[in-house]
Amino acid sequence: MPDDLKRKIPHDRSRVNLSQKYEIEYWCKEFGVSEKKLRNLVKQYGTSAAEIRKHL
């Protein structure tokens, strides 16, 4: 099933997905960080949104 390009929120809000631009934009706004910072957080703590929130 192709991605819905009109979608503005992630399918799974418990996991950070860096492969879709709209998801990167969503998580940057959600966490109040830049894309670079988001990528570093995922690299350091994994894709769990709850785990990333603990370290912000």
Image (cartoon, rainbow, N blue to C red):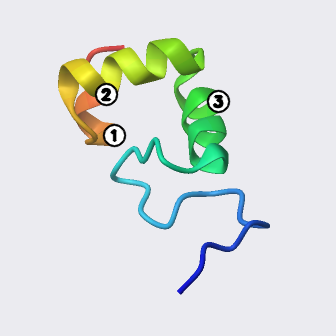
Query: Which of marks 1 and 2 precedes in the sequence?
Result: 2
Amino acid found under the numbered disc labelled 3: Lys
Tag 1, which secondary structure? Answer: helix
Query: Which of marks 2 and 3 precedes in the sequence?
Result: 3
Density class for disc 2 (Cα within 10 Å; few <14, some 14-19, many ≥20) is some
Q: Which residue is identified by label 3?
A: 29
Q: How far from the left and from the top, in percent, is residue 52? A: 30, 27
Q: Which residue is identified by label 2?
A: 42
Amino acid found under the numbered disc labelled 1: Ala
Mark 2–mark 1 Cα distance, whole angstroms, equals 9 Å
Query: Which of marks 1 and 3 precedes in the sequence?
Result: 3
Q: Is residue 37 above or below residue 43?
A: above
Amino acid found under the numbered disc labelled 2: Val
- In this picture, residue 14 sits left or right of residue 37: left
Tag 2, which secondary structure? Answer: helix
Q: Between tags 3 and 2, which lies in front?
A: 2
Mark 3–mark 2 Cα distance, whole angstroms, equals 15 Å
Q: Residue furthest right?
A: 6
Give yes or no for contact between labels 3 and 1 (Cβ–Cβ under 8 Å).
no
Front residue of this view, candidates 37 and 32:
37
- In this picture, residue 23 sits left or right of residue 39: right
Q: Which residue is identified by label 1?
A: 49
Residue at 48% over, 48% down: 19
Q: Is residue 15 above or below residue 28?
A: below
Q: Between tags 2 and 1, which lies in front?
A: 2
> Based on the displayed image, in which of its 4 quarters is residue 6 positioned?
bottom right
